[in-house]
Amino acid sequence: MSMVSPESRKSEVSMTNNALRTNLADNVIIALQALKKGDMAIVENQKIFEVMEDIQAGHKIALESIAAGEKVYRYGEPIVEATRTINRGEWVHVHNTRPVPSDMTV
């Protein structure tokens, strides 16, 4: 009878995704559940980074550093523009973004 070590058992357990990337062009991921500061963001069963602040389910998290003036992409499309540098793992919302100026023309 062979024994399975606790270390090997841990590697067999798949991680539960807690965030979603909807398009490879996106620079944000979407929280699938409420995340706390310090939690690991898990996408496609891979830990990708530590969340920098509490984030509610359905909200955006910066996948990479986004400089002030750069566009935020979701579904492969620009949706807003950063008003300040948004660091990887930070919440992306109305406090650090604005509408894309070209979207405001009539």
Image (cartoon, rainbow, N blue to C red):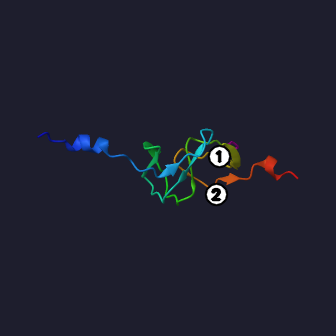
* Amino acid under disc 1: Tyr
Farthest residue, direction left? 1
Quadrant of the rendering where the N terminus is positioned: top left
Q: Is residue 100 left or right of residue 56?
A: right
Residue 3 quadrant: top left
Q: Which residue is mark 2?
A: 95
Q: Closer to the observer: label 1 or label 2? A: 1
- Crowding at dot 2, Cα within 10 Å, few <14 / some 14-19 / many 20+, comes out as few
Q: CA distance from mark 1 to mark 2?
A: 21 Å
- Camera-nearest residue between 28 and 3: 3
- The residue at the point 66 percent across, 58 percent down is 94
- The residue at the point 70 percent across, 50 percent down is 80
- Camera-nearest residue between 43 and 4: 4
Farthest residue, direction right? 106
- The residue at the point 14 percent across, 39 percent down is 2
Mark 1 residue element = loop
* Amino acid under disc 2: His
Q: Position of residue 78 (x, y in %)?
A: 70, 45
| 31 in the magenta segment | no
Q: Position of residue 70 (x, y in %)?
A: 68, 42
The label number, if any, that marks residue 75 in the structure image: 1
Farthest residue, direction front? 1
Residues shaded magenta:
68-73
- Crowding at dot 1, Cα within 10 Å, few <14 / some 14-19 / many 20+, comes out as some
